[in-house]
Amino acid sequence: MPVSILRIRENSCNSWTKIAWTRITFEDPLISQEKVTKKNISLVDSPNNILVTGGAGFIGSNLSEALISAGHHVTVLDNFSTGKMENIEMLLPHPNFRLIRGDIRNLTDCNLAVGGMDYIFHEAALGSVPRSISDPITTNEVNVSGFLNMLVAARDAKVKRFIYAASSSTYGDSESLPKVEEVIGRPLSPYAITKYVNELYADVFSRTYGIECIGLRYFNVFGRKQDPNGAYAAVIPLFVKQLMNHESPLINGDGEYSRDFTYIDNVIQMNLLAMATTDPDAINTVYNTAFGDRTTLNQLLGYLKEFLSELDPKIEKVKIIHGPNRVGDIPHSLASINKARRLLDYNPRYNLRTGLKEAVQWYWSNTNTPMNSEGFTVR
Ligand SMILES: NC(=O)c1ccc[n+]([C@@H]2O[C@H](COP(=O)([O-])OP(=O)(O)OC[C@H]3O[C@@H](n4cnc5c(N)ncnc54)[C@H](O)[C@@H]3O)[C@@H](O)[C@H]2O)c1
């Protein structure tokens, strides 16, 4: 499979750089905490070469932006299967940014991307439980074989640390709440299996080859750039799109299932802390990456209607529809974030409402007018 490397070296220090620095220094909540600020200042003093796989996707593109803003050199490896060029187009002209179009299922692509890297943030995967139920083979190839390729490449390139996207789906059918990292149940989907296998491989690689690994079990992440389109869209961008189009959102079940919805900036904070830590006890382990509160689907839709009707009063009247429960869905999910607080100084700044408010504003400002049945294309 051909690999193309896009290097753009245009005018350095353009206005974007200045904007980014301003934002990261004065406004970005993930940097504004004292402890995090100290750590990131030292990182900025010595820029690292960082690979973000899946960097054209929702989480990877936001993370890449934060890393570039913090002064690092970022390479993105992505095959654009679910990622989008528009997610990273503002990064393309930046002198510290490099894009590799490649596939993690191809070891040659992984080796090429990993060469010279200090840190890897491995975000590339096929997300979505329903997608894995309809196509478990491709999900396994990308999420397990692709993950293993990346680990092998990271080992051979002797990178400093491999930080990877794990998942709350690993808790499976465990009914205990809140979820603590050490207590998991049986997986409920092929996707959940792949994410658990990632953790097992990372653990074995750290013990066998001495590679430093940290897994971040993301809990229902949401925020700017999350794709509202397609059969496997996540629930928050999908509901926002439907409400903006005055279409009725469909809740699977009675709406009393609950989730620990986590704003993207909390996730970025956690990733930066995982990179910065020098505490040996904090490495070669996994962390819940969440806010640490749960919200039902009914409450979520209430908040979305509240925020969106401030922008378009007609949205208040849009009816909600209920359907049957979905296969593989667990009733409730709530993370304990004590371990991350204790070992990484994690302190999430955005609760659901503050994150939702920002996300809704982003969708409102970056999407076409409501009632456009052609979709929700970013301007
Ligand atoms: N979004 C969430 O709520 C959530 C929850 C738990 C875990 N995760 C994990 O976080 C990571 C990022 O998720 P996201 O929501 O940003 O998803 P996303 O689909 O927006 O991003 C995934 C990216 O990986 C790329 N990719 C997929 N297959 C690839 C391949 N074979 N080679 C190279 N690139 C490939 C895609 O093109 C895309 O850019 C994934 O590992 C996902 O499993 C996400």
Image (tube, rainbow, N blue to C red):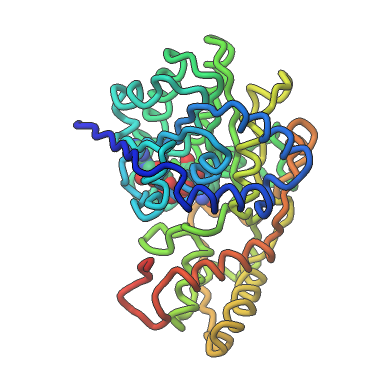
- Location of the C terminus (image quadrant): bottom left
The number of callouts visible is 0
Q: Residue at x 73, y 22 (%)?
A: 279
Residue 13 position (above or below residue 107): below
Q: Specify whether 229 is left or right of 202.
A: left
Q: Specify whether 212 is left or right of 10.
A: right
Residue 164 position (above or below residue 374): above
Q: Please state the horizontal and vertical placement of residue 323, each as a whole percent of the image.
A: 49, 72
Q: Specify whether 154 is left or right of 208.
A: left
- Location of the N terminus (image quadrant): top left
Q: Please state the horizontal and vertical placement of residue 156, each as a whole percent of the image.
A: 42, 13
Q: Residue at x 48, y 27 (%)?
A: 49
**Residue 137 can be seen, yes or no:** no
Q: Nearer the viewer, residue 168 or 59?
A: 59
Q: Please state the horizontal and vertical placement of residue 50, each as a whole percent of the image.
A: 48, 30
Q: Nearer the viewer, residue 193 or 231?
A: 231
For the view shown, which residue lies furthest in the left direction?
A: 2
Residue 174 position (above or below residue 364): above
Q: Residue at x 42, y 24 (%)?
A: 148
**Residue 51 can be seen, yes or no:** yes
In what quadrant does ligand 1 lie?
A: top left
Q: Please state the horizontal and vertical placement of residue 329, each as a whole percent of the image.
A: 54, 54
Q: Nearer the viewer, residue 322 or 271?
A: 271
Q: Residue at x 48, y 14 (%)?
A: 158
Residue 279 position (above or below residue 74): above
